[in-house]
């Protein structure tokens, strides 16, 4: 039952974001909702690396690192965006912020899982679609004043991208230190 409702949420967020954000009920635990995608991304990295000729040990390390990378992206981006939203709306809802940021990661995680088999163009398209899902969510759910919403969307997306870039550099640094 849980996986069916999560899968339906994935479909709705990716294919009909406007309609998706109009509803009132979302998953209770956004991190738990994203967990199957974190695992899927790590598993596809593991198999993609192994199919390209790496040893199982190296493939497992890269699979775990890929999952950890996306978990870190979410766990760092969500509180930063929430803190940033308090500047624009002092009574902002932490729960709605988690929902908006979490569901905007769905297309990115799905594309990352596919691209681990070396289809890079899919990731860029999905990142743009993730921005669209995020923007619709901010407009419908965060409910900022009209004159501030565009500025908030652009700056918070830049904040998420910078967070991802820094996290990526840190994880890559540690991967390079491994004696594999």
Image (cartoon, grey):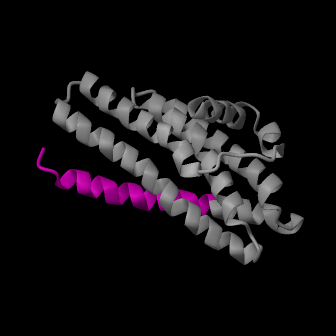
At horizontal 46% and vertical 32% (from top left) the residue drawn is: 113
In terms of image quadrants, where is residue 78?
bottom right
The image position of residue 91, as x and y in percent, is: 77, 74
In terms of image quadrants, where is residue 138?
bottom right
Nearest the viewer among 88 and 173 is 88
At horizontal 25% and vertical 56% (from top left) the residue drawn is: 174
Q: Residue furthest right?
A: 146
**Rendered view: 105 above or below 8:** below
Image quadrant where one finds the N terminus = top right
Residue 34 lies in the magenta-colored region: no
Nearest the viewer among 167 and 44 is 44
At horizontal 36% and vertical 32% (from top left) the residue drawn is: 43
At horizontal 64% and vertical 67% (from top left) the residue drawn is: 82
Image quadrant where one finds the C terminus = top left
The image position of residue 105, as x and y in percent, is: 58, 46
Q: Residue furthest left?
A: 179
Q: Is residue 85 left or right of residue 36?
A: right
In terms of image quadrants, where is residue 159?
bottom right
Please state the total of marks drawn on the protein image.
0
The image position of residue 128, as x and y in percent, is: 64, 42
Q: Is residue 44 left or right of residue 62?
A: right
Q: Residue furthest top?
A: 51
Residue 170 lies in the magenta-colored region: yes
Q: Residue furthest front?
A: 1
Dominant secondary structure of the magenta stretch? helix
**Rendered view: 17 above or below 81:** above
The image position of residue 177, as x and y in percent, is: 18, 55
Nearest the viewer among 34 and 176 is 34
Q: Is residue 40 left or right of residue 88?
A: left
**Rendered view: 1 above or below 33:** above
The part of the chain drawn in magenta is: 157-180
């Amino acid at each position: 039952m849980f996986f069916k409702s999560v899968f339906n949420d994935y479909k709705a967020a990716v294919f009909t974001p406007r309609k998706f954000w109009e509803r009132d009920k979302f998953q209770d635990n956004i991190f738990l909702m994203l967990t199957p995608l974190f695992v899927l991304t790590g598993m596809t990295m593991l198999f993609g690396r192994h199919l390209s000729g790496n040893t199982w040990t190296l493939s497992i390390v890269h699979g775990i690192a890929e999952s950890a990378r996306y978990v870190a992206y979410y766990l760092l981006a969500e509180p930063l965006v929430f803190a940033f939203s308090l500047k624009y709306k002092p009574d902002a809802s932490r729960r709605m912020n988690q929902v908006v940021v979490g569901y905007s990661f769905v297309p990115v995680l799905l594309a990352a899982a596919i691209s681990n088999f070396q289809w890079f163009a899919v990731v860029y398209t999905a990142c743009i679609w993730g921005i669209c899902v995020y923007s619709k969510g901010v407009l419908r759910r965060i409910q900022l004043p009209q004159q501030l919403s565009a500025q908030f969307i652009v700056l918070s997306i830049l904040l998420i991208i910078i967070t991802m870039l820094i996290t990526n550099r840190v994880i890559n640094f540690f991967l390079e230190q491994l004696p594999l």
